[in-house]
Amino acid sequence: MYQIEEPTYFIYLAIIPVIFVLFLLVLWWKKRTQKQFADSDLINRLSPEKSTFKSFLKISVLSLGLAFLIVSLTNPKMGTKLETIKREGVDIVFALDVSKSMLAEDIAPSRLDKAKQIITKIIDNLGSDRVGIIIYAGNSYPLLPITTDHAAAKMFLQNADPDMVSSQGTAIGGAIDRGITYFDDQEQTNRFLFVVSDGEDHNESPETLAKDAVSKGIKIFTIGVGTEKGGVIPIKENGKVISYKKDNQGEVVITTMNQQVLQDIADEGKGKYINGNKTQEAIDTVNDLLLKAEKSEFETKQFSDYKDQFQWFIGFALLFLIIDTLLLEKKTKWVQKLNLFNEKK
């Protein structure tokens, strides 16, 4: 296994063929100029130790030295380096409501987009805390297991939408129930479950499940998005609104935020209700909460990394450059015996 850290430096390898072309041009120019002054046999007699082969050898060694030097700039990495990584933090699970009501645009750009913005900015401010994501509507589904990979969390979060769930409706209780099983019982960390929703709940008694979560050491905080005035649910095609969701009587559905449900869940979950409509205020509240939370060591693992190998290429580069310096262009006895370029007649 290998890895190239700065592959853009490979472009400098184009210098090597340029050097060879210039060398051949200079060689051709010398031969042509010398013929204007004397016969080639006479020139060979005047400089019997001059070797064309040694000239080619020197330029080849110089080119190899430059090639190794350029490769060292790319910082090739090979093999593995093992390190013990210890992290301290808390476990955080976001239960994101992706029901159709979250598409309402009474909060710009929409309730769902607002919820994603809040969660994304919270993740951006996390340290070594672990994060997991659940999505729910009529049923709950795991979107991302608890991980320290915050970049992956944000990527999965952006793809969350109502089409990812098979049954519509809003079952906050189901999300809480799944959240309880989401945490690793073997890890002794502070556990926080953030339910991000407009509060519409089509099932009964999510507060009972909130009490169950508390008994297992999980605190539940709720973040509400939407307005009590409410809004319509747009039906879009290719990004354009073509209609609005209607009920069985053909009336346009008006969905409103139910703050009381979210408040009751937070109270029973020993947490706090947070108004998500005020984005920065909500983010600051969560950040302050997590900052004050007691951190505990929750992970010790072997981390595999690549070792830098550039020093080997620098070593070979210096070796070839030294050889180039020591090489002389005059013939040596063994070169004369080889007579590779028919230099003896």
Image (tube, grey):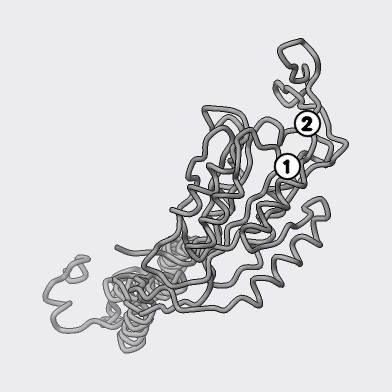
Residue 36 visible = no
172 over 119 or under it: above or below: above
Q: Looking at the picture, how far across and down is residue 106, in whole percent?
A: 84, 37
Q: Splitting the image into 4 quarters, where does residue 170 fall? A: top right
Residue type at mark 2? Thr
Alpha carbon separation for disc pair 2 and 1: 9 Å
Q: Looking at the picture, how far across and down is residue 54, in whole percent?
A: 28, 76
Q: Splitting the image into 4 quarters, where does residue 56 fall? A: bottom left
Q: Nearer the viewer, residue 7 or 292?
A: 292
Asked if the residues shown at circle 2 and circle 1 are in contact, with their CB atoms under 8 angstroms apart, the answer is yes
- Give the secondary structure at mark 2: strand
> What residue is disc 1 on?
198
Question: Which residue occupies 56% across, 56% down?
Answer: 211
344 over 273 or under it: above or below: below
Residue 44 visible = yes
Q: Residues within 10 Å of mark 1 (few under 14, many from 20)?
A: many
- Give the secondary structure at mark 1: loop
Residue type at mark 1? Asp
Question: Which residue occupies 69% across, 44% down?
Answer: 197
The answer to whether 110 appears left or right of 177 in the picture is right
Q: Looking at the picture, how far across and down is residue 76, in whole percent?
A: 39, 70
Q: Nearer the viewer, residue 118 or 189?
A: 189
Q: Which mark is residue 255?
A: 2
The quadrant the C terminus occupies is bottom left
Question: Which residue occupies 48% across, 50% down?
Answer: 144
Q: Looking at the picture, how far across and down is residue 233, in whole percent?
A: 76, 27
Question: Which residue occupies 66% across, 75% down?
Answer: 291
131 over 175 or under it: above or below: below
